[in-house]
Amino acid sequence: MTILLLLFFLFRPLNIFAATPTPTSVANDPTPAADPTKTSGLDEIKKIREAVQQKVQEKLAEISNPEVNQKRGIIGKITKIDGLEITLEDNLLTSRKLSLTNDTVVIGINKNKSNLESLKVGVEILAMGYTTEDGSLDTKRIVIVDLKTIADPLNVTVGKIVDISRASPVFVLIPSSDKNTQYQIKTDAKTEITQLQKNKISFSDLKNGQRTILVFKPESKTSKSFYATKIINLDYQTPTPTPKS
């Protein structure tokens, strides 16, 4: 709707000089004298149209680049560090660029707050932030992880729980890398469920809206559901003990 209004005003005929009388030609001078008021007005119209045109282009760019400024989480190993620019090799062996700032939060492997100096080539991390026009990740938060402890990295994803059953140990997860995909995840007594500090928690501690690292595999070759071998809850908060009366 915003673009349609902008296009309407951009291409709508402007008759702001309709009431201005036509200047009388000077005798023996076939060229009418220039009206400074009209010239100034035309310049203003040109500026307005250029400004509106720019806004239209900006809106069209937003529509044609829907992936820009989207929340994302990427797991992988650091392969290069150049100042505040990091190259990460993700689970599919694809190189991804991370853009950091001095305000980027870094959490160590024991969930203690760390600093940018703890990021080295070879360190495995979970990077969270927003996509940019050049395809990199504007990184707001980094969590150092150990991919060896979460099984085969090719079956690891980061996502958010959107629907969880209390009648059976099943939930639905949407991966951060593809908001149009849903995984139906089944668990059982063998599924390891922990928080980031590796303390064990139970299925009942999982809630809608929580972000998790999920290690999974297809339940069968024909099934559309998956079995979780390990779940790491990134948003779990240890309950505050109820004070004794």
Image: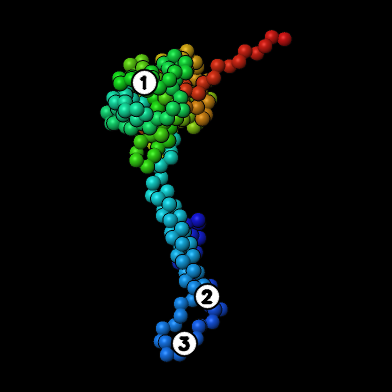
Q: Residue furthest front?
A: 28
Residue 26's disc number: 3
Residue 72 at x, y percent in the picture:
41, 33
Secondary structure of the residue carrying numbered label 3 = loop
**For residue 121, which quarter of the picture?**
top left
Q: Residue at x 43, y 56 (%)?
A: 54
Q: Are marks 2 and 1 in contact (CB under 8 Å)?
A: no
Proximity of marks 3 and 1: CB atoms separated by less than 8 Å: no
The residue at 37%/29% (across/down) is 84
Q: Earlier in the sequence, mark 3 or mark 2?
A: 2
Classify residue 116 by image quadrant: top left
Say which of 107 and 152 sits in front. 107
Q: Residue at x 50, y 83 (%)?
A: 23
State the residue at coordinates (46%, 80%). Answer: 33
Percent position (x, y) of residue 210? 50, 27
Gap in angstroms between the C-alphas marked 3 and 1: 80 Å
From the viewer's perspective, tell me whether residue 213 is left or right of residue 241.
left
